[in-house]
Amino acid sequence: PLYFYSTTSTTMMKTTVALLLLLVGVTSGFMVQPSSITNNKPSSTTVLGIGPLAKLANRDDYEEKVNNLMKIKGYSREKAEMEYDAYLDNPTNYALTKGEEYYKELGYKSLMEGVVGEADKRGEGDEVRQRLEDFKKQSQLKATGVLVVALSALVYFKLQFDVTNPMTPHYF
């Protein structure tokens, strides 16, 4: 019996830890990271440092892209590398940052205001507003689901294990 409780508790502990690790992995996508969107400057490095890796992995392609940016946009080599590194590091944030810069140049206060404003000019404002509202609802539903799973896992953990001695089963 002591061996049975110990094995069961260990298995339950491993299962709980695995679920919590999975939960952390899933929820990391919802966490706000300091990004170029908040400071309006492209980030040239990330934790992975993909831009510098691209220089090593495919030097010719990297050089071609940087040279094209210098030629088309008139950037210095340093600025072109910074821009392309920012794109490689996080294409989504890069696109959002560039979109926000574009709409601010047109006189809008934010990316979303610019998207809706330009859609209004084309007569598609209501459709765009509806898509944005649907996206917001879906995102809130996903976030709520993640929170419910996290809280359920914590309640399960609390009910199954004595916090002072995790190897002791907790009975009601």
Image (tube, rainbow, N blue to C red):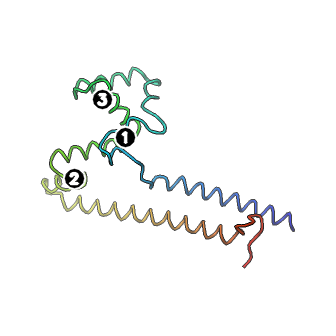
3 vs 2, front mark: 3
The image position of residue 16, as x and y in percent, is: 66, 61
| CA separation in Å, label 1 and label 2 | 19 Å
Asked if marks 1 and 2 touch (Cβ < 8 Å), the reply is: no
Around disc 1, counting alpha carbons within 10 Å, would you say few (fewer than 14), some (14 to 19), or many (20 or more)?
few
Query: Callout 3, which amino acid?
Result: Lys
The quadrant in which residue 172 appears is: bottom right
Circle 3 crowding by C-alpha within 10 Å: few under 14, some 14–19, many from 20: some
Task: Determine whether the residue tagged by mark 1 lies in a helix, strand or loop.
Answer: helix
Residue at the image point whose x is 64% and y is 56% from the top: 18
How much space separates mark 1 and mark 3, taking CA atoms? Answer: 17 Å
Quarter of the view holding residue 116: bottom left
Residue type at mark 1?
Answer: Pro
Q: Quadrant of the N terminus?
A: bottom right
159 relative to 117 in the view: left or right: right
Mark 1 or mark 3: whose residue is earlier in sequence:
3
Task: Identify the element where label 3 is drawn.
Answer: helix
The residue positioned 46% from the left and 34% from the top of the image is 49
Judged left or right of residue 145, residue 93 is: left
**Disc number placed over residue 79 in the picture, else none:** 3
User: Which residue in the protein does label 1 denote?
Assistant: 91
Q: Which of the labelled discs sits on residue 115, or is there none?
A: 2
Q: Does residue 123 sit above or below 99 in this rendering? A: below
